[in-house]
Amino acid sequence: MFYPLRVSEVEQLTDDSVAVTFAVPPELRETFRHTPGQHLALRRRSAEGEEVRRTYSICSPAAPEGEDPLLRVGIRLVEGGEFSTYALKELQVGDMVEVMEPMGRFLLPPRPGHFAAVVGGSGITPVLSMASTLLAREPEARFCLVRSDRTAASTMFLEEVADLKDRYPGRFQLVTVLSREEQQSGLPSGRLDQERLTALLPALLPVDEVDGWYLCGPFGLVVGAERALRSLGVDRGRIHQEIFHVDDGSAPTAVRTASAPAHATLTATLDGRSGSWPVREGESLLETVLRGRSDAPYACKGGVCGTCRAFLVTGEVRMDRNYALESEETDAGYVLACQSHPVTPEVELDFDR
Ligand code: FES
């Protein structure tokens, strides 16, 4: 559900990105307590009355029990992006924004161990929350961050990351690769692809002793990093990933192996209430539910954020793509409603499980 929150700070990070902080009233303190790695869905109505939702990762450290949560998200301008344009050009301190409680399963709850991340561009946002929370709470934990950006000037959270380096010199390791800057101040340059990572990572740290790998950024970087880690013998269970900006040209979609039935009916349970609706040709199951229940949960509608996750009670569905659910979740019967289409004439989803 969405809550109106007041903007308490808008900080310009780079020419094309801002960090927005929300004030959390005392009665919503527990609702907005986040686990490092989670994101917030934000909602606004455009001048034409159309609803726009976007998800943005929380960059602030998670507050310990009993302390007020600090809720800050990083927003980078996407060309033609309605919400990001509004956030960069119009949003001001004192404005009210509708915000959903923290969600997502790209998580690093603080625990002892050695962790590492490979991030590109705005992929730093959830990882900043992970690293700062972990290093502050776990005196023995270590974190290695490999980040890739175009130029130093376009790098988000430069100061915050430098601050972690100063504060935890023995436990925080940082490698920055700039793709569009030649040997600037001795930093490595060029693209961070699978081949480069396969050579770089073992030189930086004992790859097989890392307890969790966190990959976040554009599709190509995340896939390249995952392949590099797999080729270095890292177990799939230790690799966590979140893809930003799925580009229709670069991301494969599921092969359509099953044909849709001529008529299908969807039954869905949401907040304890059930309803049944016919599925119109070509629409996703989320769209079917939204026609009858405007409170159905979603944010990206692109298979990335996981907000529309539902349990498939009966029937079979085909998903166009899935960048949000882990294989354990799909094996257990969860699907993304925004990507699902019926394969059987009767399908039942439960959004409450
Ligand atoms: S709404 Fe984001 S994955 Fe479905």
Image (cartoon, helix red, strand yellow):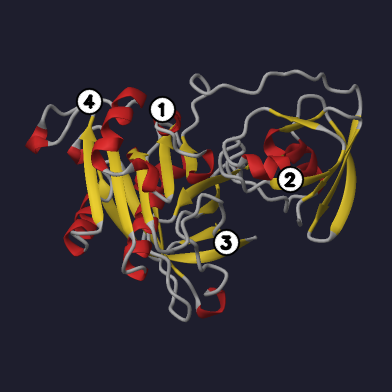
Rendered view: 65 above or below 207? below
**Mark before the other along the chain sequence, 4 or 3:** 3
SS at mark 2? loop
Q: Residues within 10 Å of mark 2 (few under 14, many from 20)?
A: few
Please name the amino acid that badge 3 sits on: Glu
Please name the amino acid that badge 1 sits on: Gly
Residue 255 lies in quadrant: top right
Query: Which of 67/15 is in front?
Result: 67
SS at mark 4? loop
| Dot label at residue 101 | 3
Q: Spatial distance from mark 2 to mark 1, Cα to Cα?
A: 27 Å
**Mark before the other along the chain sequence, 4 or 1:** 4
| Dot label at residue 224 | 1
| Dot label at residue 332 | 2
Please give left or right for residue 211 compared with residue 198 in the image: right
Q: Spatial distance from mark 3 to mark 2, Cα to Cα?
A: 24 Å
Q: Spatial distance from mark 4 to mark 3, Cα to Cα?
A: 38 Å
Q: Which residue is mark 4?
A: 190
Look at the image and tell me in which quarter the N terminus lies: bottom right
Q: Spatial distance from mark 4 to mark 1, Cα to Cα?
A: 15 Å
Residue 260 lies in quadrant: top right
